[in-house]
Image (cartoon, helix red, strand yellow):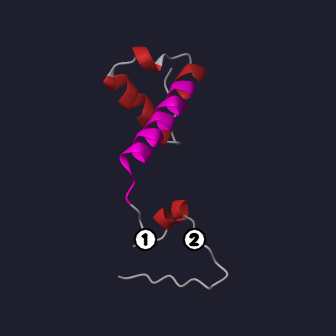
Amino acid sequence: MNITTELTTDQEVLPKDKQLIPGTATKQTDAEQKALMNYAEAQLRKLAASRGLDWGMMTDEERIDFVDDLIHEDRECSQ
């Protein structure tokens, strides 16, 4: 199944918006990828701290479980 998106001349697609349109995804540079990962980690550190957890002291397994709890809205995050 192919989806075609047509834009009028009045519609502007910003580079960040291209990822939302199938077939127009742009490749991120290494610097952009690193910046995105740093931002994501900072947000996870804040969320962990708000629940009384220390992201830096958590094992990989604990981090995975924490993120899994965040993703599944039907469950509460364990503390």
Q: Residues within 10 Å of mark 1 (few under 14, many from 20)?
A: few
Q: Is residue 10 above or below residue 65?
A: below
Q: Nearer the viewer, residue 18 or 74?
A: 18
Name the residue located 56 percent from the left edge and 20 percent from the top edge.
49
Task: Decide whether the magenta segment is chiefly helix, strand or loop.
Answer: helix
- Which dot marks residue 14? none
Left or right of 73? Residue 60 is: left
> The disc labelled 2 sits on which kind of residue?
Val
SS at badge 2: loop
Q: Which type of secondary structure does the marked residue at label 1 adopt? A: loop
First in sequence, mark 2 or 1: give its number: 2
State yes or no: residue 79 in magenta.
Answer: no
Picture residue at 47% right of the left edge, 63% below the top: 19
Give coordinates of residue 38: x percent, y percent. Answer: 46, 34
Q: Is residue 49 left or right of residue 10?
A: left
Numbered tag placed on residue 24 in the rendering = 1
Q: Residue at x 52, y 63 (%)?
A: 15
Q: Which residues are magenta?
A: 27-46
Q: Quadrant of residue 46?
A: top right
Spot the residue most to the right: 10
Position above or below: 15 against 55? below
Position of residue 79 measured from the top left corner of the image (x, y, whole percent):
51, 20
**For mark 2, what is the residue?**
13
- Can residue 76 be seen? no
The answer to which of 57 and 9 lies nearer the viewer is: 9
Give the residue type that dot 1 points to.
Thr
Picture quarter with the N terminus: bottom left
Disc 2 and disc 1: Cα gap in Å? 10 Å
Cβ atoms under marks 2 and 1 closer than 8 Å: yes
